[in-house]
Amino acid sequence: MAKTRKKEQHIAVFGESGSGKTVLVSSFYGAAREQQYGIESLFSVVADKTSQGRFLHQNYLGMRGSAQLPLATRFASESYSFSINMKDAAHQKSEKDRPFDALRLVWHDYPGEWFEQDASGTEAERRVQTFRSLLKSDVAFILVDGQRLIDNAGEEERYLKALLTNFANGLLLIKDDLLEDDKPFVQFPRIWIFALSKSDLLPDMNVIAFRDLLVEKASSEIDQLEEVLAGFVQAPEALSVGEDFVLLSSAKFASGKIEVTQRVGVDLILPIAAMLPFERHVRWAKAMNGGGKVYKHLIDGAGAMAGALGGIGALAAKFSKGNNMVIKSLGLVLTHFGGAIEEAAKLVGDNLMDANSDAVAKEENLRATLTGFRMDLASGEENEIFIRSDR
């Protein structure tokens, strides 16, 4: 039996202590374990480490059954790995026609305390190593705590400016330890999304109002953060900071009750992780006109994703797996199949729905799932819980 091939997507989640990081990942995984989710979905979500899966599921069940929040964690960094496995279909395409069979989402949590206070000795070393572990991430979420916005109502800039300044300064403190010979990274999170956590506490705030609040109250600090992050990467023109926004709520919290089914934005995390880098990287790579390490990194995997979406044929899918020693660079895949890849990246509206319906009818569950993810992002925009950059 052929070994299952999985395409990895990494995300990094940053937030101050108490901003809801552990509750968020527990809600994400616990919801995926619900029976109804399993019946309706074309895929299953399984924790690669059984102990982590039990821990997150226990947290979720405690919220659902006993209105009990997970215990707060301090200085605890964790990476959670989830396999997103497609359900068997009666007429699956043969392996040679699929660039990959499944997805793996690796979720990196970065302790908020490291942005709020100094670390030294072993703790400082662990901070650097933890950050190194998330360098594979394409997408990073910066959590803005809804409760803190309420606590600073009318003076939100006090909280927002402090949050972003501490974050930027925290990155500067570890920059010299991260960069070898002051050489910026090729691989580094390049899409930084502002996420309003605990958005259920602010029911009248849609994502447009959230974006406008950040821009109005902390525009200079966003610029400062972008400048700091640009210092970490080669080709900073392929960097997006504060251009994408999402509302997140792990559940609806009331006195003595937690409604875990009333989530906001949590179901968009997987579509964002899977599809947003593909869309953005293709646009950035096209603007670079080919060549260089950053170009290759950006386009790496684009051929595979386009193949999975049905944008290119089996030949390009084969190239994207690196089976051909001559055409091992996916930059060449873009050269030969660039138009089809760009069309796959721009698939929207009726064409997207038609592609999804076609995949469902043909029981091509991987293609149906990925086109469904893109429909989820469009729905998030329509419902004003998600904004994605046009750049």
Image (tube, rainbow, N blue to C red):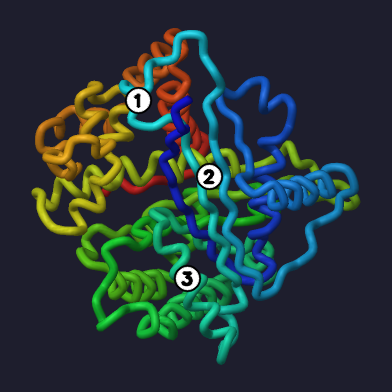
Q: Amino acid at mark 2?
A: Ile
Q: Nearer the viewer, residue 296 or 217?
A: 296
Q: Earlier in the sequence, mark 1 or mark 2?
A: 1
Label 3 crowd (10 A; few <14 / some 14-19 / many >=20): some
Q: Is residue 360 above or below residue 218?
A: above
| Residue drawn where x is 68% and y is 58% of the image | 22
- The residue mark sitting in front, 1 or 3, is 1
Q: Nearer the viewer, residue 301 or 385?
A: 301
- In space, the residues marked 2 and 3 are separated at their CA atoms by 21 Å
Q: Which secondary structure lies at badge 2?
A: helix
Q: Which residue is mark 3?
A: 131
Q: Amino acid at mark 1?
A: Arg
- The residue mark sitting in front, 2 or 3, is 3
Whether residue 153 is visible here, answered yes or no, is no
Q: Is residue 272 above or below residue 144?
A: above
Can you give x and y, in whole percent of width and height, for residue 257 in the image? 87, 47
- The residue mark sitting in front, 1 or 2, is 1
Can you give x and y, in whole percent of width and height, for residue 98 in the image? 35, 25
Figure quadrant of residue 306: top left
Residue 269 numbered mark, or none: 2
Can you give x and y, in whole percent of width and height, for residue 346 in the image? 27, 32
| Residue drawn where x is 52% and y is 35% of the image | 383
| Residue drawn where x is 26% and y is 29% of the image | 317
Residue 98 numbered mark, or none: 1
Q: Is residue 380 above or below residue 2?
A: below
Figure quadrant of residue 87: top right
- In space, the residues marked 1 and 3 are separated at their CA atoms by 33 Å
